Image: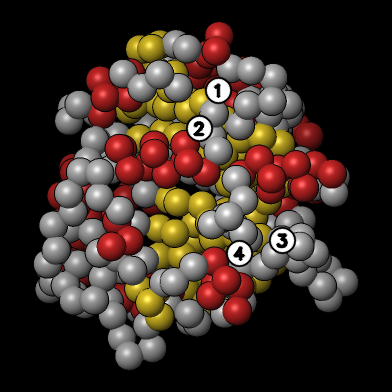
């Protein structure tokens, strides 16, 4: 495992040359700042709400990697006073789907900081997130000697066809995509790295119904008290050292966890799926986007009579999708 981790760190070091600073404000990062790292392409319409959401949550500085956007994403991000931006037109796939770039920025700037690593369509919800800032969570985790915080991806979707309601720039995406599956999930333990592997939800039942074992993983570790020796292995699904993957209680209790509300299923997905089909830069020859493109042709309605309408984090805890553990 140590050799494997050194390999990922070496890859990150070598891939650093792909990144060109577009706006470097890292000299403004203070000792106890919470950082957010995100790799994106053509997400301009999402960015105002995304950035403001995490600002309100308590993120102090953003580290963005703009992978060849042509919709103004990079220019908009460069104007944000609390963001540093790197641009690259290098292969997303060859950089292990952006992970080498993120591991490098986390190694260089995230050392001894709490770091949030998410996609532009992922929104972290944690226990008491409606009343307590992210700093309260990280302070409690640190006091409890916990270095990593897990979150399950919760795919959110609208009632009716995915492309029926247009998403406007700056809009809360959960005004449209406010429904989710409360069940229909499978979970198993990875014997090698020790992390949990979760699958299911609307993507499994709608786009991977014939092969649910190929559905996207829903387990992530998006919040870590970073050390320069750490490395994400597969997106933020797994991390090394593998002790960081033990984000669950093996003695029958519960550790605190959250959810990542996933705002993928908006009308923007059709355009995104076509673009990614052309680029072929995603995992497994972009098979996930192949499934989306084919499935979206029928203008599907992901809503069912068992769908739950999102209210707040307490609802998710009652449903067993997240836990406050012993944080009171």
Residue at 35%, 73% (x, y): give it: 179
Residue at 44%, 59% (x, y): give it: 261
Res 240 visible: no
Q: Position of residue 190 (x, y in %)?
A: 69, 61
The tag earlier along the polypeptide, 4 or 3, is 4
The tag earlier along the polypeptide, 1 or 2, is 2
Q: Which mark is residue 37?
A: 2
Image vertical order of residue 123 relative to residue 178, above or below: above
Q: Position of residue 248 (x, y in %)?
A: 75, 63
Specify the quadrant of the image occupied by residue 150.
Answer: bottom right
> In the rendered image, which residue does mark 3 sit on?
256
Could you tell me how far apart the alpha carbons at marks 1 and 2 are, in whole angstroms? 8 Å
The tag earlier along the polypeptide, 1 or 4, is 1
Q: Which mark is residue 197?
A: 4
Dot 2 falls on a residue whose secondary structure is: strand
The tag earlier along the polypeptide, 1 or 3, is 1
Q: Is residue 76 left or right of residue 39?
A: left
Could you tell me how far apart the alpha carbons at marks 1 and 4 are, in whole angstroms? 26 Å
Residues at circles 1 and 2 in contact by the CB criterion of under 8 Å: yes
> In the rendered image, which residue does mark 1 sit on?
105
């Amino acid at each position: 495992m140590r050799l494997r981790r050194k390999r990922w760190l070496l890859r990150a070091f070598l891939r650093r040359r792909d990144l060109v600073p577009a706006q470097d404000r890292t000299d403004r990062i203070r000792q106890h700042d919470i950082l957010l790292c995100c790799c994106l392409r053509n997400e301009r319409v999402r960015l105002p709400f995304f950035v403001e959401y995490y600002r309100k949550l308590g993120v102090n500085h953003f580290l963005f990697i703009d992978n060849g956007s042509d919709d103004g994403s990079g220019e908009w991000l460069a104007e944000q006073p609390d963001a540093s931006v790197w641009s690259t037109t290098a292969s997303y796939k060859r950089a292990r789907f952006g992970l080498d770039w993120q591991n490098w920025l986390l190694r260089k700037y995230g050392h001894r900081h709490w770091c949030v690593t998410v996609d532009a369509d992922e929104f972290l919800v944690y226990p008491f997130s409606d009343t307590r800032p992210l700093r309260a969570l990280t302070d409690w985790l640190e006091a409890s000697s916990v270095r990593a915080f897990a979150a399950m991806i919760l795919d959110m979707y609208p009632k009716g066809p995915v492309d029926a309601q247009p998403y406007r720039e700056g809009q809360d995406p959960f005004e449209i995509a406010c429904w989710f599956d409360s069940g229909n999930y499978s979970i198993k333990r990875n014997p090698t790295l020790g992390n949990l592997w979760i699958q299911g939800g609307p993507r499994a039942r709608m786009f991977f119904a014939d092969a649910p074992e190929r559905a996207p993983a829903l387990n992530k570790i998006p919040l870590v008290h970073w050390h320069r020796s750490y490395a994400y292995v597969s997106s933020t699904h797994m991390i090394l050292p593998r002790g960081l993957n033990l984000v669950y209680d093996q003695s029958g209790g519960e550790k605190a966890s959250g959810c990542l509300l996933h705002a993928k299923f908006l009308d923007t997905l059709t355009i995104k799926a076509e673009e990614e089909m052309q680029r072929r830069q995603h995992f497994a020859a972009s098979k996930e986007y192949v499934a989306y493109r084919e499935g979206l042709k029928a203008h599907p309605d992901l809503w069912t009579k068992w769908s739950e309408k999102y209210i707040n984090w307490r609802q998710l805890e009652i449903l067993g999708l997240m836990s406050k553990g012993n944080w009171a």
